[in-house]
Image (cartoon, rainbow, N blue to C red):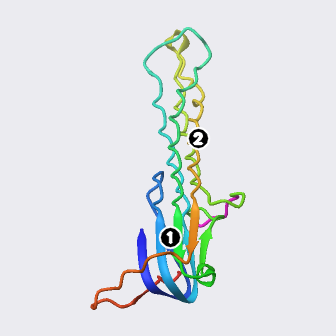
Amino acid sequence: MQLQVQVLIIEGTAELIASTPAGLNTGSIELTVGAVAGGSLSILNAGTPGLPGPNAPPRDQSTCAADPAASAGNPGGPGQNGGDAGNVTIYTLSQSNLAAFRVLTDTNAAGQPQDCGGHICGGAGGPGGAGGSGVPVKPACDSNALGPNGPPGAAGSTGHNAQFKSQIGFNGSIAVPEPSRQDSRKAPRGE
């Protein structure tokens, strides 16, 4: 998302959420702002968690086995990798303008706190898929005992951290809006 405004008016405390479906990378945010009036704007740019892996199908239940011990099911599929967090870049004319923006480094896409070690977090890896059902083993073809579930699939990898960049006193000018548009845009109200 790119936004260029001469004056950004923020009413109260507002949030800008870079949302994306589970497991996909969060889009980058680039703001070029001449001046900021009003409150503060929080930018949530965390990556989204990956989806769980698929369950494994059970083994063939129609076979007989001489082994009296029931066999375990197949393992579940691996979880999907978490999405990467979105980069945030803010160009503005003064340090006081930059102070109006807060990039959330300690909150995930669901709004829950997470430990990012002071960095902007990537999405959490998806949990592994559930294990497959146990196999019915029929020693002498007369037992209906089920084996235990297979092991869960491996967890997905954690998404990559984002980069935050800011530049004070940028060169160039902000495009002047067309006459039919206002010279400022209001940030959305927080809910």
Badge number at residue 103? none
Q: In the rendered structure, which amino acid carries the disc numbered 2?
A: Ala
Q: Is residue 51 above or below residue 131?
A: below
Q: Position of residue 67 (x, y in %)?
A: 59, 10
Q: In which quarter of the image is the N terminus?
A: bottom left
Q: Distance between the residues labelled 1 and 2?
A: 26 Å
Report if residue 76 lies within the magenta region. Answer: no
Q: In the rendered structure, which amino acid carries the disc numbered 1?
A: Ile
* SS of the residue under disc 1: strand
Q: Nearer the viewer, residue 189 or 72?
A: 189
* SS of the residue under disc 2: loop
The residue singled out by tag 2 in the image is 155
Q: Which of 14 and 150 is in front in this view?
A: 14
Q: Give the range drawn in magenta.
A: 111-115
Q: Nearer the viewer, residue 128 or 69?
A: 128
Q: Position of residue 43 (x, y in %)?
A: 55, 72
The residue at 59%/20% (across/down) is 70
